[in-house]
Image (cartoon, rainbow, N blue to C red):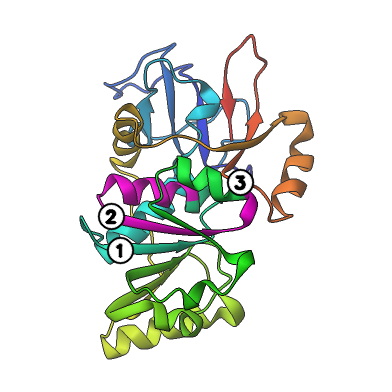
Amino acid sequence: MIFGMDFAGEVESVGAGTVSFKHGDRVFGMCPSRSNGAQAEYVSVPERAVAAMPAGARYDEVVVCEGAFYANAVLKRIDLKVGQRIMIYGATGAIGTAMVQLAKSSGAVVTAVVATRHLALLKSLGADHVIDYTSGDFTRIGETFDFVVDAVGKISFFRCRKLLKPDGIFAATDLGPWAQNVILAMWSSITRNNRVVIPVPGRINGFVSFLKSRMEAGEFRAIIDRKYPLAAIADAYRYVETGQKVGIVVINVATIEQSAQVS
């Protein structure tokens, strides 16, 4: 199996039924979850998973679909609306940085919880409030939210319960400590109180085009931590596994002369 969901590059060839793209088009997109393969020189994907790159964008600036896809699934599941208050814990990863931007694009009031060194970054992404979790207990700020989202799987519903309004929802993108989020989500579903949810992403259809529109509106941008050549992909994985990356890590599959990159 070849890993990798996000890709960006030039169209080499198209199938007989393709109507939106032609040879040489600059495109980006995301491989379907059961047919990954973006970390290679070529990848074959359905037309629905591809969009033309925004004018003037670099290839490395658009390999951002996967994190945004999961972030968007969370926001759709909780039905985030204009003016609602959302706290995002772990707002520096691929999912977290995407969620902050998409939540702001939806008109929500966003609070991001990050380490000291990332405060300026989150403010630049549009977060209305940024809390440094290293300087104190972020759960004791005396505020309540419509939604609290754990974007890294490191906190629990019980710890964050005091942050939620009476009908507030705790959402997670991971299993959480000791897989408790799964158990709590199942119980919430059985009791129909919807206090804890783990959103499951749907189909890709239309998502890449949606993300492109957000980029063109100036409401979404890539946060690139590091770039590696394909020959050093093992080093890239080792770095990602440290859990310290911010945003995305890009793999340069083709040479600069070929001007194609995937991640």
Residue range corresponding to the magenta coloring: 97-117
Q: Amino acid under label 3? A: Val
Residue 116 x %, y %: 62, 55
Q: Which badge, 1 or 3, comes first in the chain's sequence? A: 1
Residue 195: quadrant of the picture? bottom left
Side of 164 where 184 appears, left or right: right
* Mark 1 residue crowding within 10 angstroms, few (<14) / some (14–19) / many (20+): many
Question: Which numbered tag is attached to residue 108?
Answer: 2
**Drawn side of residue 251 relative to residue 54, left or right:** right
Residue 162: image x %, image y %?
Answer: 41, 83
Return the residue at label 1.
85
| Residue type marked 1 | Arg
Q: What residue type is labelled 2?
A: Ala
Residue 235 versus residue 148: which sits nearer the camera?
A: 148
CA gap between label 2 and label 3 equals 23 Å
Q: Residue at x 28, y 21 (%)?
A: 20
Closer to the camera in the image, 102 or 208: 102
Above-or-below relation of 138 to 226: below
Task: Classify mark 2: helix, strand or loop.
Answer: loop
Question: Sequence order check: which comes first, mark 2 or mark 3?
Answer: 2
Considering the image in quadrants, where does the C terminus appear?
top right
Which residue corresponds to the image point at 32% horizontal and 42% vertical from the top-left? Answer: 207
> Disc 3 marks which residue?
246
